[in-house]
Image (cartoon, rainbow, N blue to C red):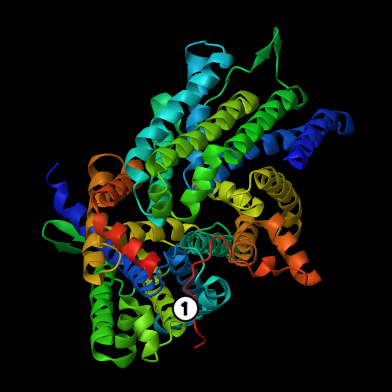
Amino acid sequence: MLDLLPQLILSGVTIGSIYALVALGFVLIYSVTGILNFAQGEFSMLSALLCATLLSWHLPLGLAALCAVAAVCAIGALTERLAIQPAFGGHPLTLIIITFGVSMAFRGIALMLWGADPYTIPEFTPGPALVVLGGVLVRQAMWAVGLTVAVVAALFVFFVRTVPGAAVRACADNAFASRLVGISPRRMSLLAFTLSAGLAAVAGIVITPITGATYDMGLSLGLKGFVAAVIGGLTSAPAAVVGAYLVGIIEALTTGYLSPGYGTAITFLVLLIVLFLQREGLLHGAQRRQA
Amino acid sequence: MTRERVALGLLALVIVALPFAVSTAYAFNVLNIIGLYAIVTLGLILLGCSGQISLGQAAFYGLGAYASALLSRDLGWTPWITIPLAIVAVGGVAYVVGLPTLRLAEHFFVLATVGFGIIVNVLMVQLLPVTGGGNGLRDIPPLQIAGVRLVTDRQFYYPIWALTFGTLILARNITSHRTGRALRAILSSEVGAAALGIDVPRYKMEVFVLSAAYAALAGALYAHYIRFISPSPFSLLASLFFLIMAAVGGLTNIWGGLFGAALVTVLDQVIRAEVPRVFPRVGGEYQTAIYGVLLVLIMIFFPRGIVRGALDLRRALSGRSPATQAPRADAEPAEEGRA
């Protein structure tokens, strides 16, 4: 039983890194706009499938990945402009339903374009798996963890050191006051959606060499990232990253010790428990309604 | 009120007369499915009247189906007993689920119902000895009336639509009397409603349990009608499907529920028949693309449902009414300045 533990924790950390990227996107959009974007996972799916297609056109991996991420950022911006913006200021439930609709639309379109077959991307640096702390770690897992750390660091620099980053934080803090000093909440909302789509896109491409990519991968990825974000309180980026690793490890342990099928159920049980225990999330929601 | 009575009478007439106008088993099948979905959607709309949205309706629908199927198949009880039992049991489940979840702020409540729905669906797949897993349950006993086993689509038409009609009247009575006024007050402001002496938690719980009971009734009927159930029709996708029906009809409009269920079911049949011709190699849930776009468009342009939305539009075009300028019930006062 215990021999399995290091292995399970390693795979939990790997998948947790991916959830972290998706969760950060949730936090970003929620803090700036108060919207829970359920289409988040679909951005990962789109980028993974786009990247696989570009690779099949014999583009080098780096270029293909960059093009896919850029394209998905554009799709994120377009989503915000076409689906979210027209209903801006509507009831929060209206906006949630819209993001569910967007997610369904993307899934269906992907199924029409790519079919139901799984696609794959080769490992970024092929080679034999590494043995770490008594567990086997595929090289791609290092990429997943490393890239997540790099992206989180880059985000940190963006938010703390740059003027647009400060504007986003101001808008998240108080949209009304930031409008008074000339920051457009609408433009910040667009920025948040673009950035979140980019984060999810990176996650989708990094995980594909390990799990493969299918048109329906986005739903579970998005929901797990969302659980991670809620565990973190929905407005704190570092807490969301911690939450993501927690979700990844819980999922890996359930899969290893209980049954693969129960992984999702346990994750959502954790979500429900966190929702019931957490007054902070509820409080934040109440404040936002008044704002 | 009288106009609504006339509408109810007309509806009853149409329900009674329809079997004489259609003949194929396929048409009866579609009509029966519309009836079942209408019951679920009515429950969702009752919930919507209290300002809540649930994405766990498919779980209640499925629990009703599994409960009644298991009780009647394995214990040999008649479906006439197991269907009410299933409804009561699912109502109990909804009560237990509602105790912690209904205290959550609105969008966290939606998430809790998503989580609940997914957990129930996973259990349906995983609890092999009880639910039969992905293979589902076969040989569910049919309903019997006076010794006649109801096995064809045509025979099932009247029982289903009688119950749909009954649930419509119940929903209409609830929303047009004291409870309905209380729910409308809660919809516009929970704090305001509480200040007027309305027991907000109690009303929200009652309407949540009732909506689950509606879904369970439809689910139990479905189990004895199709006589085979598996976890796939009770997934998150199904919950979204019900939500689309409610959104098409207008999330707080009882008559809209019937309209939404009919329109979306017919649309679904058309899409299933037509899309393979355009995209021949595609199978599975491709229709989600169309539903997704539909849902987005409705929520942007007709957040109060297509019927009311169209009425508003006509008024706006004829230019005689300031009513279109009246604040939307679901819009926040905060509006954005131009960037």
Taking the image as shown, residue B142 lies to the left or right of residue B16, namely left
Which residue appears at 52% of the width and 11% of the height? Answer: B77
Q: Nearer the viewer, residue B39 or A246?
A: B39
Quadrant into which the N terminus of chain B falls: top right
Farthest front residue in view: B196
Q: Amino acid at mark 1?
A: Ala
Quarter holding residue B174 = top right
Q: Is residue A138 visible?
A: no
Numbered disc 1: secondary structure? helix
* Residue nearest the observer in this picture, B177 or A144: B177
Q: Residues within 10 Å of mark 1 (few under 14, many from 20)?
A: many
Question: Dividing the picture into quarters, in which one does residue B35 lie?
Answer: top right
Front residue of this view, candidates A46 and B39: B39
Please say whether residue A34 is visible from this viewpoint.
yes
Task: Tell me if residue A263 comes above or below residue B314 in the rendering.
Answer: above
- Of A9 and A32, nearer the camera is A32
The answer to whether B200 appears left or right of A10 in the picture is right
Q: Position of residue A136 (x, y in %)?
A: 20, 58
The x and y percentages for residue A16 are 27, 61
Name the chain under label 1. Answer: A
Residue B320 coordinates in the image, percent (x, y): 78, 70
Where residue B206 appears, as percent x and y from the top left, is 45, 35
The answer to whether B272 is drawn above or below residue B226 in the figure is: below
Report the side of B57 relative to A121 (left or right).
right
**Residue at the spot 24% in from the left edge and 90% down from the top edge:** A161
Residue with the most extreme top position: B147
Residue at horizontal 37 percent and vertical 45 percent from the top: B102
Mark 1 = which residue?
A68
